[in-house]
Amino acid sequence: MLGTILCLLLGVWIPGIQAATDFNKLRTLAEQRYGDRAKNTIIELEVLLNSLRDAPDQEKLEKINLFVNDKIRRFDDDINIWGQSDYWATPLESLGREAGDCEDYSIAKYVFLRELGIPNEKLRLTYVRAKIGGPNSRISQAHMILSYYPTPNAEPLILDNLILSIRPASRRPDLVPIFSFNSEGLWTGTSTTPSSDSLSHLSRWRNVLARMQADGIE
Amino acid sequence: MSLIKQLWIAVSLLMLLVFAACVIASIEASKHTLEQQLQMKNIDNATSLALSLSQIDKEDPVNVALLLSAQFDNGHYQRIRLVDPEGKLISEHYNADIQPNTPSWFNRAFSIEVHPGVAQVQNGWSQYGTLSLESDATFAYQALWNGARKMLLWSVAIALLAGALGSWLLRIITRPLSEMANMAEAIGDQRFITMTEPRVTEFKSLAQAMNRLSNRIRKMLNEQSQLLEQLRFEANYEPISGLMNRKYFTSRVSAYLDNEDNFEEGVLVVSHIAELADINAKLGGSGTDQILKRIGHALTELCKPENGMFAGRLSGADFAVFSSSPHNRELLCQQVKDTIISAAALNESFPDFSPRTIASHIGRSDQLDSLKDLMAVIRQRNDMAQLQLEMDDLAQQAASPLNTTRTESEWRARLDNAIMSKRLRLASFPVISPSNTLIHNEGPMRLQLEPNGPWLPAAEFIGWAIKLDLITEMDDLLVQIAIEDLKNGKAAIGLNISSRAVSNPAYLDHLHALLQANPEVADKLWLEVPEDGVFRHMEAFRNFCLTLKPLGCRIGVEHVGAQVARLGELNDLGLSYIKIDASVIRNIDSNTGNQAFLKGLCLIVHSLGMIAIAEGVQSNEEMAALPDLGIDGMTGPAIQPPTV
């Protein structure tokens, strides 16, 4: 608790330091919206994140990958979950419903890793073409994964929900990268709010980030 | 500063503030929108360019350079910059020539701050670089500047319109206010006018209060005048017949005899009812009173149509009629006699009833003693023929030879000549205050019929002047002479304006033009109109006052006495002074009845904001008594110009 407050204070006062997630708010919202299971999930998340604060990056990646892939149990299309053809859910929504599609997994992982202090430059949300059933398959599908670059020029590690274990990109011949992005340049200066004010004007990506903030995830 | 001006300034300041706030807020809002749009453009264009770069073959750097150039050259960008993951510059395009053609102070005041759009470029799985892109903001400044200018123009246009509308509304709303200010000023000048009530509630109650004040004062003045009239009646009239008593009758006649400007010759008729004692014995006191009342009424009616004609009861059985204009003596004598006979209606009880009646011409040179002579004669002589002979003797002295000696054409030639060569001047009779300072010099007209001839008073030629229709020219000339005199440094002049001149619009215009042309002398000109003229031409006189008063001259009424009951009607004309007729002033030191009357009259005159001047002061005793009665100025034979 003291750490949270300290972090909050530091987050306010020292630019560049990641602001902490408001777990109280997150917990309350989870309970209100999705019930006790969701609340427990959030408590588990809090415990996990707190235990990983000082862990090496590799451990952070593995634990978070495992947690997200585990807790978002149902991998489904947005249309079945949300009734919309392409809906970018916040981590709270994904964890609460225990369901999501590829970008929901990736977004949740990205957010939790950022929460653990992994810098933005090392993380990329990447649109990929996934060949279903292996590298030689003829059936391909639009997919999204989270890439981790230990150094700028290194080969990335792939955090995916199709293949649950983390592998270097070279060991994922079924995936062809198309485009990648992170939140760099979206937040202007040291401000933590998007420089646009109305949700209706935001891109999907900025929209989900803004809703996340409303949930209590900074 | 006037209320309207202050309100105007306050409203203008407020409007300026509101418009300034509007313009600034609107510019800020536009600026914000433009910033958002530019931001979105930056992000979107960076993303799509990064997407394209991610897809192409980047082995040959030319591909990358071409793509960036194509985008930069064909789009509206300030800067496109690509750096590799380690922060080393790969390529940069920068347009240094961008200069917004809007004023630099405007750009500084409303600077558009947009962050560059940032996107990541991939090369397969590996990072190729970070793209950052800034758009050209010139168009945004231009749009902002144009919008601001348009807004300012509209604001000014609307402000002008609102100003015009506002001052129109203000004028309508505050119109009653200026009317009330005028009224308050009028009341301050003791002119008790009333105004129509405005519809605005606050103004309405104020106007009502002021109207009530005016009306109450007017009512009070009217009551006072009525009371005064009663006082005048008691002092000057004989209660049974309602005719003037002897004292008043003789002072009226003598006031005429002394007035050389308006009086030339008159007729005096005296009638003696020798049978009065017998009538009294036969019909009793009340019967006799009835007869006397009828006679009094009939004589009053006889005199009414003619100005300057009046009747009196000199003693129990003696009646008298005076006419100030040259009458047929015998005709008037017969008229008076017939009037008394028919009014008495004594055919049955006294078939032979016939009052002894004689008539005499009476001129300015006569003394009032002739009245006493007449009365003595009428009592003693029973033989009417003899009586008439003696009368004629008396009248001989009064006969004026002047009027009849010249023919009409001779008169016309002489008067024309006098006017042409301006042989007209103003006489000068001082009007002084009790403290012996000059108020003004009364200036009656004098005319020379022949060069170097005698200066004649008005009464000797005015009749011919009226008959020959030369009087208007004389009036005009007289005003010019008065103004010339004043311009030459003479003291204030009191000018007689005849009732004929008052109701002549051409004369009024002439007077107005002259006064307007000589504003410096206006306050030294005192214009006075005779009482009977004022009340006979009330509307014309009102118009006269309203036209000339604003020019600064003083207007008054002269020969006041007979119609004091109507004095209240003058309350809203802003008159400056009243001259009280010599008949009231005569023997004022001994006449207690007239003293009370004069005291009351002065009181009313003062409460109307005027001063009271006594005319025809003849003796030092009169002069000594007047100031205590409230008189502010005196004129007449006994008054000498103040010695400096």
Image (tube, coloured by chain):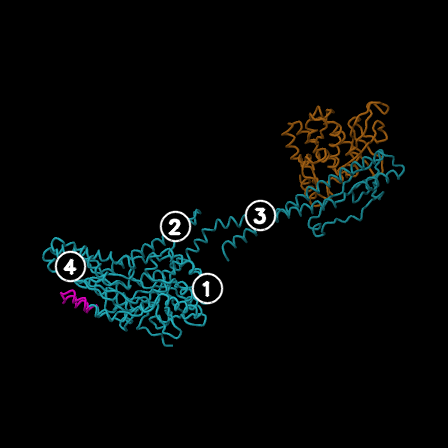
Q: Circle 3 — which element?
A: helix
Question: Label for residue B354?
Answer: 4
User: Sequence-wise, which precedes: disc 1 or disc 3?
Assistant: 3
Q: Circle 2 — which element?
A: helix
User: Sequence-wise, which precedes: disc 4 or disc 1?
Assistant: 4
Could you say which is closer to the camera, residue A135 or residue A138? A138
Judge depth for marks 2 and 1 and give the one in front: 1
Residue type at tag 3: Leu
What residue did someone put label 2 on? B208
Could you say which is closer to the camera, residue B497 or residue B474? B474
Could you say which is closer to the camera, residue B2 or residue B218? B218
The image shows residue B591 at horizontal and vertical percentages of 23, 67
Q: Which residues are magenta?
A: B371-390
The image shows residue B543 at horizontal and vertical percentages of 40, 57
Chain letter of disc 2? B
Chain letter of disc 3? B
Chain letter of disc 1? B
Distance from Cα at disc 1 to Cα at disc 3: 44 Å
Which chain is the one coloured orange? A
**Is there a contact, CB below 8 Å, between mark 3 and mark 4?**
no
What residue did someone put label 3 on? B161
Give residue B432's quadrant in the image. Answer: bottom left
Is disc 4 surrounded by few (<14), some (14 to 19) or many (20+) residues within 10 Å? some
Is disc 3 surrounded by few (<14), some (14 to 19) or many (20+) residues within 10 Å? few
Chain B colour? cyan
Q: Is B414 contained in the magenta span?
A: no
What residue did someone put label 1 on? B514
The image shows residue B395 at horizontal and vertical percentages of 23, 69
Residues behind callouts 3 and 4 on a single chain: yes
Residue type at tag 4: Ser
